[in-house]
Amino acid sequence: MRKCSVTKKLQIVAGGLDDYKKLAHYHYRNSRLTAYAAIFAMRLHNETVGVIVYTMPSPGLELRNVATGGAFVGFDRATQLALINKNIRCISRVIIEPRFRCLGLASRLVRETMPLMNVPVIEALAVMGSVNPFFERAGMTAYTAPMPTRCAQMSEAFSMAGVEKNMLINPQKVQRTIDRLQQNESKFIELQIKHFLQSYGKRRNMPAGMERTRFVLSKLTERPTYYIWFNKEVRS
């Protein structure tokens, strides 16, 4: 299946919940949509192979204030919410059916549907943005919050033990690396993990093992990247 022959036949059209439901199980947040502003489907011969879901924006996002230069702050609560809801839509889901991945279709789906929302600002939050930056390839600008000191220290400790940054999304690989450490290295990592967990209440006493490693990694990688796109054709 050649890339050029497939992409030429794909069409992006207004979609609905049925399109989302067909592909929802391929998304890491396989959950029911409570509300949405718009859904667009990417179809090949009437088969849905991609879907993008737009929702109303969250009321307050720190990185939105940074990206917009504080355009939505300094108002009373009611005015602020009205401005946000009028001017912003959020990309909540982008799903490509596995057979059609690695063809740049996620970026295309984002790039071609953002103007169709007819609002000044489109935003998105992506937990795995640094791993698969398709929002940036679609023309959005990324903003990342600074890593908390405890997370930076834990990441550095892992690096010293041979756990590379690109391994942090794979708990199995990290656990195998930890299990192979020499005694001194093992003690070092154990102390670092226990210190790291002090910030997480009941989790501070988690026993060593896969569940604990998975939890630690989730906290190291949970900081979502904020993406924003300004539609120059629409006035706020």
Image (cartoon, rainbow, N blue to C red):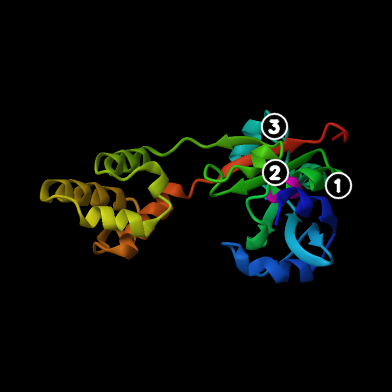
Q: Main secondary structure of the magenta part?
A: helix
Alpha-carbon neighbours of circle 2 within 10 Å: few (<14), some, or many (≥20)? Answer: many
Which is nearer the N-term, disc 3 or disc 1?
3
For residue 29, which numbered disc appears in the image? none
- Tag 2: amino acid: Glu
The residue carrying pointer 3 sits among few (fewer than 14), some (14 to 19) or many (20 or more) residues within 10 Å by Cα, namely few
- Residue assigned mark 2: 123
Number of dots carrying numbers? 3
Amino acid of disc 3: Thr
Instruction: From the image, state whether disc 2 or disc 1 is nearer to you.
Output: 1
| Location of residue 63 in the rendering, given as x and y in whole percent from the top left corner | 60, 37
Label 2's element? strand
**Residues tagged 2 and 3 counted as in contact (Cβ below 8 A):** no
Q: Is residue 116 above or below residue 175?
A: above
Query: What segment is highlighted magenta in the picture?
Result: 105-109
Q: Secondary structure at mark 1?
A: helix
| 54 displayed left or right of 210 | right
Disc sitting over residue 116 in the figure: 1
Report x, y in % for residue 216. 35, 54
Q: Earlier in the sequence, mark 2 or mark 3?
A: 3
Q: CA distance from mark 2 to mark 1?
A: 14 Å
Q: Is residue 32 visible?
A: yes
Type of amino acid at the residue the image marks with label 1: Leu
Secondary structure at numbered mark 3: loop
Indicate yes or no whether the magenta region holds residue 233. no
Q: Which residue is mark 3?
A: 68
Q: Quadrant of the N terminus?
A: bottom right
85 on left or right of 94: right
Residue visible at 71% across and 71% down in the picture: 22
